[in-house]
Image (cartoon, helix red, strand yellow):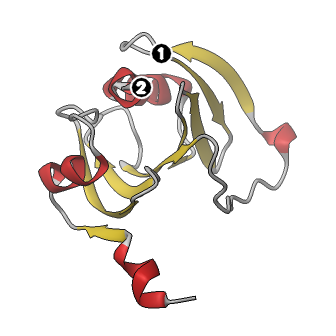
Amino acid sequence: MDWNKQADIWQDIDDSNDEFFRAVGTGDFLGLSNRVQGGIAHSSGFFRFIGISEISSLRNGTFTFESRPKGIFFNVYSSISDMDDFEDWIYETASGVAVLIAISEHQSLIFADLPNSYVSILLPGDTAQALEDFADSIDFSMLMM
C-alpha cells in the first residue's frame, strides 16, 4: 500500500468549526453550544472529532462524534462491558430526528440511523435530561443532506 496516497485522503481538523464544516461538507450542525476541538475527515464522507459542549446540564462537556457513510466498512471499536448496565430509549430531537440514547453510570451513547450515514456520539455517563438536552443541541437534519 502506498501510505502517502492513503494519507492524502485524510484531513486533520484543528480547533476551527468553519474549517471542520468545509472539510466534511455540512452546515453548522453543532449549533451555538458545541464546538470541534479536533478531528479527522476522510474523502469517503467518514469523519470523527472530539468536541466540547457548553450544555449546562452535562456533568462533563467532552464528547466523541463519528459519522460513517452507509455502504463503506470502517472498523468500529467501543467497549461496553455489560449491556444490562444501560437504560435506552428512542428520543425525537428538536431537529425532528429520532435517536437512540443509552446511558449507564460510566458512559452514555447517542446513535442516529440517517438515510446516508450512521452517527454515534460517546459521552461520559450522565442523566437522561442532560443527554436529551445535548441531543437537542445537535441539528441531525443537517447531516441528512
Residue 8 is situated, as x and y percent measured from the top left of the image, at: 35, 77
Instruction: Indicate whether 31 appears above or below 14.
Output: above
Residue 27, numbered circle? none
Q: Earlier in the sequence, mark 2 or mark 1?
A: 1
Q: Is residue 42 left or right of residue 109?
A: left
Judging from the image, what secondary structure is the residue with disc 1 in?
loop
Judging from the image, what secondary structure is the residue with disc 2 in?
helix
User: Amino acid type of disc 1?
Assistant: Val
Q: Which residue is mark 1?
A: 97
| Quadrant where the N terminus is found in the figure | bottom right
Instruction: Indicate whether 107 appears above or below 16.
Output: above
Dot 1 alpha-carbon crowd within 10 angstroms: few under 14, some 14 to 19, many 20 or more: some
Q: Which residue is mark 2?
A: 144
Residue 82 is situated, as x and y percent measured from the top left of the image, at: 85, 49
Mark-to-mark CA distance, 2 and 1: 10 Å
Please tell me which residue is depicted at 44% across the width and 29% down the height of the picture: 130
Q: How many marks can you see?
A: 2
Q: Is residue 34 left or right of residue 6?
A: left
Residue 62 is situated, as x and y percent measured from the top left of the image, at: 38, 53
Dot 2 alpha-carbon crowd within 10 angstroms: few under 14, some 14 to 19, many 20 or more: few
Residue 87 is situated, as x and y percent measured from the top left of the image, at: 73, 29
Q: Disc 2 vs disc 1: which is toward the camera?
A: 2
User: Amino acid type of disc 2?
Assistant: Met
